[in-house]
């Protein structure tokens, strides 16, 4: 795993083993994961810095997606998946029994390898999480939609067709749309599972 500090021009690797608590977003402790009894993650211990981009690099099947899914408890939805160990977010173990999992997923957003837009308009896709939070002020929603679509580099391509169905977008545009949807709720942590894969394919 590599973490970079890109604030000073060329990214410099960060020494994670000596990362102080106030600069740490997540602490992963003795994490083991089994799918139907077969171990997929073995004794993972690491710190992930706050406010930085951290990449997991490794061969296909080594467990990158599995580890990402642990961080917002998406593996809870996988039958036969068993997780042992701790992941501390703001000092609290997200695997504690009293954790509110939907609230955790608002704090830790995720974009998957394949785009998964909802069968709704482009606009409604982007503000979906805000509507779930009960926000209905049109100005707040419009501002959030524009800000998120700009941040995902999609605004210029869709600003005149916000009420079109999201399924009419190209694969790469759909991928940027789901990134905009994830950004819109301003999560503390954003997990990106190779969401650029389709873009690089389009470039070749
Ligand atoms: N839902 C599942 N049920 C059973 N086994 C699974 C499941 N998801 C992943 N695995 C297994 O866990 C291991 C890690 O898979 P994972 O998808 O995390 O790898 P990855 O590093 O993300 O690979 P890739 O680079 O191909 O996306 C693999 O052996 C895979 O077959
Ligand atoms: Mg993967």
Image: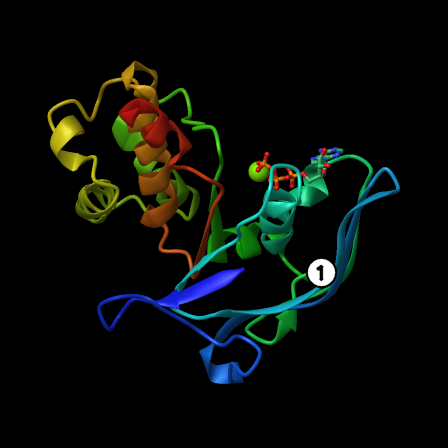
Q: Which residue is mark 1?
A: 95
Residue at 71%, 44% (x, y): give it: 76
In this picture, residue 180 sits left or right of residue 151: right
In this picture, residue 28 sits left or right of residue 82: left
Residue 177 shows in this picture = yes
In this picture, residue 46 sits left or right of residue 196: right
Q: Where does residue 29 sit, x and y in percent of width and height? A: 71, 69
Residue 27 shows in this picture = no
- Near mark 1 (Cα within 10 A), the count class, few <14, some 14-19 or many ≥20, is some
Position of 35 relative to 100 (above/below):
above
Instruction: Say which of 161 and 78 sits in front.
Output: 78
Quadrant position of the C terminus in the picture: top left
Residue at 86%, 37% (x, y): give it: 36
Q: Where does residue 1 sit, x and y in percent of width and height? A: 54, 60
Instruction: Say which of 63 and 128 sits in front.
Output: 63
Spot the residue most to the right.
37
In this picture, residue 31 sits left or right of residue 120: right
Residue at 23%, 18% (x, y): give it: 164
Ligand 1: quadrant of the figure? top right
Q: Where does residue 99 sit, x and y in percent of width and height? A: 66, 61
Count of numbered circles in the view = 1
Secondary-structure class at tag 1 = loop
- Can you tell which quarter of the image residue 142 is in? top left
């Amino acid at each position: 795993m590599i973490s970079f500090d890109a604030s000073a021009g060329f990214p410099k690797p960060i020494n994670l083993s000596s990362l102080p608590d106030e600069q740490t977003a997540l602490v992963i402790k003795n994490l083991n994961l089994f799918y139907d009894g077969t171990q997929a993650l073995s004794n993972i211990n690491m710190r992930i810095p706050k406010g930085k981009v951290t990449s997991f690099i490794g061969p296909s099947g080594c467990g990158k997606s599995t580890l990402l899914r642990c961080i917002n408890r998406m593996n809870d939805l996988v039958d036969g998946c068993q997780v042992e160990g701790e992941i501390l977010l703001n000092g609290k173990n997200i695997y504690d029994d009293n954790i509110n999992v939907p609230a955790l997923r608002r704090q830790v957003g995720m974009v998957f390898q394949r785009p998964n837009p909802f069968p709704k308009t482009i606009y409604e896709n982007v503000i979906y999480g805000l509507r779930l939070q009960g926000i209905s002020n049109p100005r707040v929603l419009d501002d959030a939609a524009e800000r998120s679509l700009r941040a995902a580099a999609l605004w210029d391509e869709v600003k005149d067709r916000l009420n079109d169905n999201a399924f009419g977008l190209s694969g790469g545009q759909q991928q940027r749309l789901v990134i905009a949807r994830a950004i819109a709720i301003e999560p503390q942590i954003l997990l990106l599972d190779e969401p650029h894969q389709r873009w690089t394919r389009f470039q070749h």
